[in-house]
Image: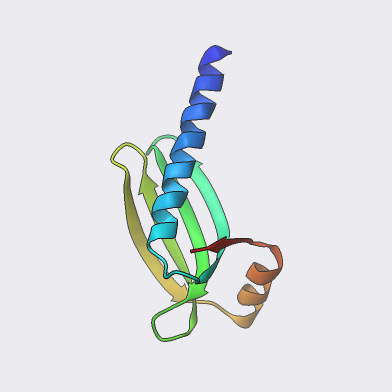
């Protein structure tokens, strides 16, 4: 049981570090919706999917991976979102303020 608590604390600590790294890449005052968040134990990595305005002022869905072992955030790509996806993100996703 003690190992489970320790592992849970480590994952929680890694999540805080991962979310901090993610927040640092966005512009101050920008609103971002966190659509997905998951942890891959095999890779010791957090995966995030966010919806935000891209460089051309279009709404995009961006994917990131945070490597907990190396403490590095990787950009995995982006694609435009539909009006329906944007509406769903606004309605149900967690808001991150940079």
Q: Residue furthest left?
A: 70
Tell whether 77 sits left or right of 88: left
Q: Nearer the viewer, residue 62 or 20?
A: 20
Q: Nearer the viewer, residue 49 or 71?
A: 71
Which quarter of the image is occupied by the N terminus?
top right
Q: Position of residue 71 (x, y in %)?
A: 32, 43
Is residue 79 shown above or below 23? below
Count of numbered circles in the view: 0
Q: Residue furthest right?
A: 91
Q: Position of residue 67 (x, y in %)?
A: 35, 44
Q: Position of residue 15 (x, y in %)?
A: 48, 42
Q: Residue at x 48, y 64 (%)?
A: 98
Q: Residue furthest top?
A: 1
Q: Residue at x 38, y 48 (%)?
A: 66
Q: Position of residue 37 (x, y in %)?
A: 54, 51
Q: Residue at x 40, y 42 (%)?
A: 45
Tell whether 66 sits left or right of 86: left
Q: Nearer the viewer, residue 82 or 58?
A: 58
Is residue 75 shown above or below 61? above
**Picture quadrant of residue 14:** top left
Q: Residue at x 46, y 85 (%)?
A: 57
Q: How is the image coloured?
A: rainbow
């Amino acid at each position: 049981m003690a190992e489970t608590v320790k592992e849970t604390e480590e994952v929680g600590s890694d999540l805080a570090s991962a979310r901090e790294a993610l927040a640092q890449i966005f512009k101050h005052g920008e609103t971002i919706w966190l659509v997905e968040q998951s942890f891959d134990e095999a890779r010791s990595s957090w995966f995030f999917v966010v919806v935000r305005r891209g460089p051309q002022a279009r709404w995009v869905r961006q994917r990131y991976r945070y490597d907990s072992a190396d403490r590095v955030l990787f950009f995995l790509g982006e694609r435009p979102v539909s009006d329906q996806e944007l509406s769903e993100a606004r309605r149900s996703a967690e808001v991150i303020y940079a």
